[in-house]
Image (cartoon, helix red, strand yellow):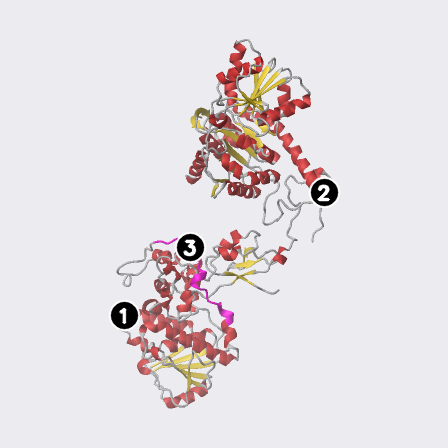
Amino acid sequence: MKKVMMGTEAAALAAKLARVQVVSAYPITPQTVIVEELADIIGRGELAAKYINVESEHSAMASCIGASASGARTFTATSSQGLALMHEVLHYAANGRFPIVMANANRALTPPWNLYCDHTDSLSQRDTGWIQYYCSDVQDVLDAILIAYRVAEIVSLPVMINLDAFYLTHTSELLDVPEQDAVDRFLPPFRPVFKLDTDDPKTFGNVCGSDLYTSIKFKHQQDTLAATAVWNKMADAFADQFGRRHPAVAPYRTEDAELVIIGIGTATGAIRLAVDRLREEGIAAGSLGLSMVRPFPYADVLSALENTRHVMVVDRDVSFGAEGILAQEVKAGLFDRGTDCRFHGFIAGIGGNDISSDGIIQLARQALTGKEETSKTGNSFWTEVLP
Amino acid sequence: MQSKKTIQCLADLPVMPTTLDTMAWNKTGAWRFLTPVARNKIPPCRQGCPAGTPVPDFINALKQNGENGALEIILAHNPLPGLTGRLCYHPCQTKCVRRDLDEGVSIQRIERYLADCGDFQPPAADPGKAGCVTVVGAGPLGLSCAYFLGLQGVTVKVTDAGTRAGGALLDIAPEKLDPGVLEKEIDRLVAAGRLELSLGTETPAAALAEMADQSDMVILDPTAGNGAVAAPESAVSFNPFDDEAPAGNVVAPTLPDNLIPFKAPMIAHYIGAGRRVARLVAACLSGESFASQEAANSPDQPVTAEQIRLDRFRAEQSAETSPRKRQVEWTREQVMAAADRCLSCGTCNLCEQCVISCPDTSILKNPAGTGVCVDLYHCKGCGICAYECPRGVITMEEINE
């Protein structure tokens, strides 16, 4: 069935199609539509789920953890400051291995107040142990949430599905909406190995001495690293059934590329367009859309960058005192390969500035010619900065 | 304690950081210093009732078991609910806690409905084993006393000079009380108490001594109305509210000044006094202590209006208010709507708020399904159950175990 929908509506519909059993959330712009939609869906009796009203995002995640522990498929959504407020319990959800799925609308952190697109909110939570997926369009939002539940419940880890504020949350697209019975075939009911059960009381998140702690963390790390392959496998299964591919990494014309431009979220669309235009000018460009940032898909990234001489990363975020967060991640991967390529880090589009194909082409030219037309601080070039 | 599984290699680790086996062996009850005690308490409406009727109990029984279940509870305290349901000045309703929320529960209307439509008969006690008593006078106190003695297995004979039983009740004007209702109520009382009723029998004072020889005790009803037998000098004056046991075998119960002469709105007081005389006399005949009998039968502590958490209940406009409500017979729907408004003060109605709120699943429905009990091996004494109980049933107490 075809439907025109905004990203927020698509996220709510995906949660409904996934037959989530508990939704606990606190409203925040620009995510609010997601939980409003879900409240309506549950209120109309179209989804047999419990909607828990809470007084904060911290409580939202805490009750999601409790619900998930009791064996319920659980969903929440947040953005920016709300995600930051969840920080403590984000660790708890991942360390406790609760397969919660959360939609996060990527919005700038305050002050100054800014409601627009920025990835620092979720990328600054990269070490909490969550699987992080960044959507490139509205269809991606709907499909990725369905794949996310499948993966989360296999690897027993929480998944954060990120969608760019306004570019996705409030932009309508024509979607393929899968039928419920098709989704049911793809996504079986949640059957946890361990759950809170009053008839068989176990302690969850109990005290553990130094002897076992390291082993538990080692296993957690093993399982998290393995999640990329699980995602790709489930994304293939999804593609077989629905005809749409959502792999962890989306390389574009990288086979013979001298310049590979890396980005996440909606900017990947503008980057692909820029690649086509650069190719028309005779520049061997390619792009790499990183859908998955955690676990970091080292192997997929390195194989896409195998022959390139110039690696360019567009960060819609910043790690103050260092550089763009993606730039650090990609550099860390390249170091292991011992490559001799040139690296170009750009900070662009933060606080809602548009990332256009024109802008990307300019940055690519700068990378290739070495003419520094943008402001530089540290290792990064910043666009849209006052002279 | 169970033997522990030991983890030898990574593969032994569970996916989630949980214990591998049950933790039920961990008796966290040892951490507790305050203990939740789930105990029904005397609700304000019952405190106000001269007959001691446990109002929330019969309303809960009506909801769970229907009319006869409710009537069974009423008849254990009051043999004339059709009369109290019409005549009583209903001090129960004056004390109803719901008045602080919106409007009191129309307890009297519920009772009247149950009296009129229920056909429950109390089961027969073993007759004769507990002695034999003659009640002289078939007024409300005498009938009530005879009924409760009968329920306890005493063989009771009731004599009255009149041709109809009722004593002072017969003086109530027919427009205030339908004589048919009076007759029906007395018939039920006589049948349920297995009373031998001897009407039209004059009892000269001189005959009392002879009657006393033929039975274990003779009780003179002060509410016998026109046919009342004046107490002879040999009779023992007995105040059922102050005296502990009658000393003698011809007993003349006395009443406080406000109950003399008979006043129809005070009907529950006469029933309550008769019940008290019966219990004191039965205790005297059986040699058991009255106090122990009472303690075994009902809660001993009152619940206060402050212990009822009105903020947990929603105020509503009741549908009961009707300008001619005294005249109109209530339908079952009206009665059930009124019953649903009862807050069940001090009386567990298995709302299970405590059960679902306990973080340690240590509050459980009791096996009989009549209330809740506490798993003291695991209850840590956090007090959430007592806080959650909206009707003052659960209290946290210091108990030295």
Whether residue A288 is visible here, answered yes or no, is no
- Crowd tier of the residue under label 2, counting other residues whose Cα lies within 10 Å: few below 14, some 14–19, many 20 or above: few
Give the residue type at disc 1.
Lys
- The N terminus of chain A appears in which quarter of the rendering? top left
Per the rendered image, the range of residues in magenta is B295-316
Residue A304 position in % (x across, y down): 62, 19
The answer for which chain carries disc 3 is B
Q: CA distance from mark 3 to mark 1?
A: 40 Å
Question: What residue sits right under mark 3 in the picture?
Answer: B311
Which SS class for mark 2? helix
Query: Up-down: is B149 above or below A64?
Result: below
Mark 3 or 1, which is nearer the eye?
A: 3
Whether residue B156 is visible here, answered yes or no, is yes
Question: What residue sits right under mark 1 in the picture?
Answer: B176
Residue ID at (69%, 53%): B1
In magenta segment, residue B340? no
Query: Up-down: is A87 above or below A179?
Result: below
The answer for which chain carries disc 2 is A
Give the residue type at disc 2.
Asp
A103 vs B81, left or right, is right
Question: What residue sits right under mark 2 in the picture?
Answer: A211
Residue ID at (30%, 82%): B226
